[in-house]
Image (cartoon, rainbow, N blue to C red):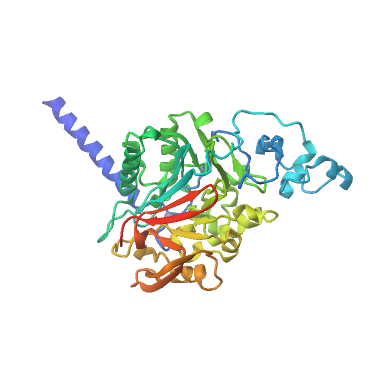
Amino acid sequence: MVFRSASIALIVAIGMATVAHGQQDSEPPYQDADGEEIFGPGYQPQSAPEKGLPLYIGRPNAGMSAPDSLLLLPQDSFRPMSETWSLPAEERRRQLPSDVPLLRDVRRGFETWQMPRLTPNRRVPTAPVAPTAEMKVHYVYVGQGAGAIVELPCGVAAVDFGGEFGGGSGSVDGGALFVAYLKTFMEQHPAYANKIDVVYLSHPHADHINGAKQLRESGISIEKIVDNGQTSNAGSVGKQTEFRNWATQGDLKHRYSAVELARQVTATGATNAAIDPFSCATVTAFWGGANEKLSIPSYSNPNNHSVVLRFDFGQASFLFMGDLEADAAKDMLDQFDENTEVFDADVLQLAHHGAANGIDDSLLKVVSPRIAIISMGDRTSKGQKSAWGHGHPRLESLSILQDDPITVGDMRSPSQTFWGYPDEEVPTKDFTVNRAIYGTGWEGTIIVTATQSGQYTVAAGRGH
Ligand SMILES: [Zn+2]
């Protein structure tokens, strides 16, 4: 009897611990005025102790004129040697491959130029698989949040796996919606053998990561994982750390890549065999954990540590911005100021669900998308963490996309009347869309199909 009572006491204690953990989930350690989890004292991210595969120079839009010998040099070879040039101009010309667009940092690093070491970790993109081959991106309806499936003839990837959470009338479990869609997708595509080649996590806010539990229990295996490298034992960064360790089963060295700003030094982005395991596409990362900027107030928000990704498939290109806000988007553009065309992509997943602070004119002009996708919730949910609670998408953002200045190239015919928010927690106002702007909260899951010659078709899955 004594033993049995002790067991019950233990079970009760475990139950309470679980409840306490659940409460911690719904109330992150630090929040900004909008209730968004931010970094605060005692909850600062660390860099990943094991950063996984070394980063190599990216080759967005495979037409970039960098020689393969240079692409095979790890980014670490280009660490700046000094703040200023010490070599005479003639010496510089002799040593630098003139056709490679590089940042100043990299040019400094060329003082230590050595012959490239070849490595099997870096796959140079191969020729197109077939002229008729297609890729598809499924921007899955997950309520207020984001989760996408990238379907390639040579593999499959997920970009974020989260969605709405937090209760309130009409709210949905976005993480569960994403994983349910993914499971159905895998059933319909047995060639992928229930395996995702790489999962990219833009940043660990709950609306991007909260399908983690369902994904772990789904029976779908994950080959590689890419995140912003931030590590903690608290808050959502702790969840990212935990998921990374689970997905790689501790094999971080071979199956993981941290995308940290401090490790990227070129103007053509970064890649490696985890970021780009595909033979039929090219994947490049441009931004990620920016821990060295944490003393700047806007970087207390994990949004500004989002991994930014570009997929090139023949002539087709897709850009994923995570939740990067305008301040960080400007910093990113500065980082690539000698070569901003690396952001010139056809299909753009708008940053931060179409929030007012997610739209940066200068970046939009550089991207000049043909098609813009907004991953956001519908307007029936009135939870605190819903599209209504955050005011996503904001009318002023929609206006920037198609009115002044016009930044989305393709037309939408016939035009359709949807809605946007003038502010948080207020009724929507109608917005007539005449450019190729699509929203998951308006139309449900959106599937963009691209051919290698850069032809696009857009299909919306579920009405709202
Ligand atoms: Zn988000």
Say if 214 sits above or below 430 in the image.
Answer: above
Instruction: From the viewer's perspective, tell me whether residue 258 is left or right of residue 187.
Output: right
Residue shown at 57%/49% (left/top)? Answer: 315
For the C terminus, the quadrant is: bottom left
View quadrant of ligand 1? bottom left
Pick the front one: 69 or 92: 69
Residue 446 shows up from this direction:
yes
Instruction: From the viewer's perspective, tell me whether residue 292 is left or right of residue 175.
Output: right
Pick the front one: 39 or 431: 431
Number of marks in the rendered image: 0
Measured from the top left, where is residue 402 in percent x and y?
50, 70
Measured from the top left, where is residue 73 in percent x and y?
68, 35
Measured from the top left, where is residue 248 in percent x and y?
45, 32
Residue shown at 30%/44% (left/top)? Answer: 180
Residue shown at 50%/62% (left/top)? Answer: 358
Say if 361 sits above or below 101 in the image.
Answer: below
Measured from the top left, where is residue 361 in percent x and y?
57, 66
Say if 23 sits above or below 50 in the image.
Answer: below
